[in-house]
Image (cartoon, rainbow, N blue to C red):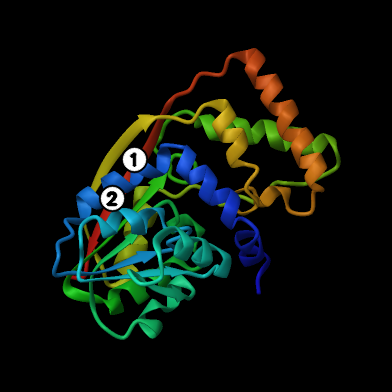
Amino acid sequence: MSNFQILWDESGEIYHQYGLSYSQYKKTNQKLIELSSINGSQIVIDLACGTGLTTKEILKKNPEKIYAVDFSKDMLNQAKRFIGDNEVNFILSDASKIDQVISEKVDRVLCNSAFWQFPDQIQVLKSIKNTLKEDGLFIFNLNSQFYDFGLEESHRTRIIKEIFSEMEKRGYNPQGKLKEKVNQKLIQKMIDESGLVLIKTELYSFEGARLEDTIDFFKIPAVAPFFDGVPSSEQEEILSLVKSRLEKEELETPLNKWIYFVVGNK
């Protein structure tokens, strides 16, 4: 088991509670569902389903069948408790192997707030291509922490810089523990290499997270890998110091910017 997977297995409960309390997941799910045009005759995969927040929204469209896939056993267990075992087919699997664990072709693959987490994104796309029907769609999104919108640094990036600065003062080296941002050209290249086709992109934005929300977000082990190896008491101290420092600056809360990709199999 990789350290990355261990971090997610340690994050199920706190991640789920954060997702329920913060509107980001509700809003990003609404847009994802809107772009997916799900109907009652379709088979749908919720890829990297986490604790089931997206799956819950898919269920409201009454598709013929839903597969909820995640590589974390703890995340899937949270999803099962949240949704119920009888309504969804839960599958423990790496995203790059869904064509091996799901034998039938599907109409839609949805992935909310997770595509940047996959270590081998091209292989994930190839696996999705093998799983989709000829007229199937894959819909995923990226936010300003992981996608280059050509704008000034994001609210969250500013907070991360302060966290890193405080960690470095204490002798830690957090650099290199966050993924580099991608851009349209790189996403297009990956889609082309996988044999899929980019149908359209759509920008979406809504009120961003407050400073307090973002600090709480970084208390989740899986989304703050830079804290790996730092005692939990010291993590709390660092986050408290950063919050106090940025409160004095009255840091503005900008819009939360996302880009959605609708990808087809032909």
Q: Nearer the viewer, residue 141 or 266?
A: 141
Q: Residue at x 21, y 70 (%)?
A: 265
Gap between marks 2 and 1 measured at Cα: 9 Å
Identify the residue at the far right of this view.
171
Q: Is residue 77 visible?
A: yes
Residue denoted by label 1: 27
Kind of residue at disc 2: Leu
* Badge 2 density bin: few <14, some 14–19, many ≥20, Cα 10 Å: many
Q: Is 233 positioned to the left or the right of 86 in the image?
A: right
Kind of residue at disc 1: Lys
Residue 137 falls in image quadrant: bottom left
Do the CB atoms of the residues marked 2 and 1 lie less than 8 Å apart? no
Residue denoted by label 2: 32
| Residue 3 on image: x %, y % | 68, 65
| Residue 226 on image: x %, y % | 69, 49
Quadrant in the picture for the N terminus = bottom right
Residue 28 falls in image quadrant: top left
Sequence-wise, which precedes: disc 2 or disc 1?
1
* Badge 1 density bin: few <14, some 14–19, many ≥20, Cα 10 Å: some
